[in-house]
Amino acid sequence: MTSITDAPESPLPFGSARSRKTTGHHVIRWLRANLFASITSSVISLILIALLAKAFVSLVQWGYWNAIWSVPSDQTGACRSIRGLGACWAVIPEKYRFILFGTYPFSEQWRPALATLVFIALFYVSSRRRWWRKELIAVWAAALILIGVLMWGGIAGLTYVSQDRWGGLPVTLILATFGLAFGFPLGIAVALGRRSKLPAIRSLCVLYVELIRGVPLISLLFMASVMFPLFMPDGVNVDKLLRAQIAFVLYAGAYLAEVIRGGLQAIPRGQHDAADALGLSYWKKNGLIILPQAIRHVIPPLVNTFIAFFKDTSLVLIIGIFDLLTTAKTSIIDPAWQPFSVEVYVFVGLIYFVFCFAMSSYSRQLEAQAHPN
């Protein structure tokens, strides 16, 4: 029988005086341990805090207090009068449709907007573990078909829109999604091939990885844009967006292969021996035992590669494809709004940040689930 003295203490009510006092002690202890542990640390911390406070105040003054939020497109004089003192966020409502959707027909821009929402919904569903079933493949197939119908049109009463008119955020999501969706299994196959006992397969995989990683992505895009059509039969013309997509798949596959190979090398030899002792075939051994452990070991570098790859899609500018960053640059060619490029880049930067931060946060959740201790 548990006595009164042995009974656990009841948790402190949130917001109570004792709770606030305990929280205050924790904060003071953390500050002493991390910022004010010594005289040198205290001086450096105070200097940095003062600099950050000054930068924060200046940013708030520029981006909020002195900012102009709306102005007629033909009356930008008010924005010019505060240039350097405050932001002119009026450029965003004026140009956001071109930034997000490029030269896609104005009356049809609900279609790329809906396609973007389908992409986001697809990412969300794929991030939920309860949906990690075979049916998810059918969900992906249906979603990608729907996105293709929305973007191209030509059926179900939708006006046909050629890929030359596509631009902005949907193009960035298409390049990144398809590049990673096809590059990841390619990377797994190449990583396994580099560890193959067959010299021909191993040499071919090594050659592919070293060749792709040994040249800049810009070179691959140029090759896909200029050289690839030369190898096609007469009369066969592959769209430049598809050519760029192929280059991104090859690029992603090579880099992901090396990340996954590092995870494979971290698996103890005993795991291989145990799988062989159970009589598992090569594919079952890797699919059920080796690869899940290897991928769990390399979640941080995998996500780092995903984030870098998502941002690298902006390089398609050099072959004339209007991704999100390219449409942002083009939107401020208008002389009336040209002085306010900083505001446009901040807007685009926030979009990139949201997607990259979502990937980073999801990777931390996966790490916590994979390593609960």
Image (cartoon, rainbow, N blue to C red):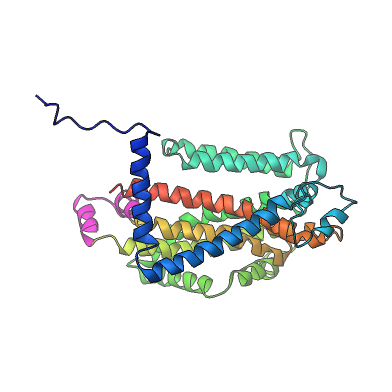
Camera sees residue 259: yes
Q: Nearer the viewer, residue 335 or 216?
A: 335
Report the residue that reaches farthest toward the left. 1
Q: Nearer the viewer, residue 71 or 289?
A: 71
Which secondary structure is most common in the magenta stretch? helix
Q: Which residues are magenta?
A: 269-293
Picture coordinates of residue 266, whole percent (x, y):
30, 62
Camera sees residue 250: no
Report the residue that reaches farthest toward the bottom. 214
Q: Is residue 308 above or below residue 92?
A: below
Magenta stretch: residue 307 in it?
A: no
Q: Is residue 110 above or below residue 38?
A: above
- The image quadrant that residue 7 belongs to is top left
Picture coordinates of residue 180, whole percent (x, y):
53, 54
Picture coordinates of residue 256, whole percent (x, y):
46, 61
- The image quadrant that residue 202 belongs to is bottom left
Residue at point 35%, 59% (across, down): 32
Relative side of 202 to 343, left or right: left
Residue at point 58%, 37% (across, down): 142
Q: Nearer the viewer, residue 68 or 145?
A: 68
Picture coordinates of residue 90, whole percent (x, y):
78, 49
Q: Nearer the viewer, residue 65 or 323?
A: 65
Relative side of 19 to 337, left or right: left
Q: Is residue 355 above or below residue 40?
A: above
Q: Is residue 198 above or below residue 285?
A: below
Report the residue that reaches farthest toward the top. 1
Q: Quadrant of the N terminus?
A: top left
Report the residue that reaches farthest toward the right. 74
Residue at point 52%, 52% (across, down): 357
